[in-house]
Image (spheres, grey):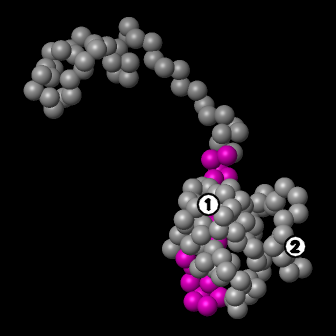
């Protein structure tokens, strides 16, 4: 069924005059959608995704990268390109003079898949739950507990 746009020359207000509006409070003949409360688990997940992250600063510049995620949701939305750029900014993409100057260092593999890179970056910035499924080479904790 073709429904013309309100800006279309074929649109006529009389076309939809008798169409009941389910959201109109004056409409008694239409059953309204049942508004249910959000699941407690859904609310918990939304609250978790809103948790703020403290930006990690570069040991050479003293500044955070502009793409550093400010909340958990932003962390999960990072692209592979952004993760590679963040790893380079924080001296983790190539082993160098500043790589070990951070509390945690990771071995960055440019050929790794997106989820592996995300997990390594999450571990680098101290997120829980970003551990590898089993021992992964290239991870050094430097004796700190997280």
Percent coordinates x, y for residue 7 in the rendering: 15, 32
- For disc 2, the neighbor class at 10 Å (few under 14, some 14 to 19, many from 20) is few
Tell me the element at label 1.
helix
Answer few, some or many: residues within 10 Å of disc 1's Cα (few below 14, many 20 plus, some between 14 and 19): some
Q: Return the residue nearer the eye: 57 or 23.
A: 57
| Residue beneath the point at 68% across and 62% down | 112
**Left or right, 134 with reference to 105:** right
Farthest residue, direction left: 9
**Quadrant of the rendering where the C terminus is positioned:** bottom right
Q: Residue at x 60, y 31 (%)?
A: 37
x%, y% of residue 132?
82, 59
The numbered dot on residue 60 is none
Point 54% across, 65% down: residue: 81
Say if the magenta span includes residue 50. yes
Which region is colored magenta?
A: 45-65
Which residue lies under the disc numbered 1?
75
Q: Earlier in the sequence, mark 1 or mark 2?
A: 1
The answer to whether residue 72 is visible is: no
If the image is split into quadrants, where does the N terminus sit? top left
Q: Is residue 38 magenta?
A: no
Residue 63, compared with residue 68, is above or below; it is below
Q: Is residue 30 left or right of residue 102?
A: left
Number of numbered labels in the structure image = 2
Q: Quadrant of residue 75?
A: bottom right
Of residues 49 and 79, which is closer to you in this image? 79
Quadrant location of residue 68? bottom right
| Residue ID for mark 2 | 145
Q: Main secondary structure of the magenta part?
A: loop
The quadrant in which residue 74 appears is bottom right
């Amino acid at each position: 069924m073709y429904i013309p746009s309100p800006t279309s020359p074929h649109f006529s207000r009389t076309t939809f005059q008798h169409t009941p509006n389910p959201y109109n409070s004056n409409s008694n003949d239409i059953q309204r959608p049942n508004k249910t409360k959000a699941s407690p688990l859904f609310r918990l997940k939304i609250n978790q995704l809103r948790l703020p992250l403290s930006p990690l600063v570069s040991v050479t510049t003293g500044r955070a990268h502009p793409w550093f995620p400010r909340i958990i949701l932003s962390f999960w939305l990072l692209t592979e390109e952004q993760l590679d750029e963040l790893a380079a900014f924080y001296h983790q993409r190539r082993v160098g003079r500043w790589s070990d100057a951070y509390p945690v260092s990771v071995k960055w593999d440019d050929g790794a898949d997106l989820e592996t890179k995300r997990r390594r970056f999450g571990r680098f910035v101290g997120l829980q739950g970003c551990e590898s499924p089993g021992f992964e080479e290239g991870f050094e904790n430097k004796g700190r507990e997280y």
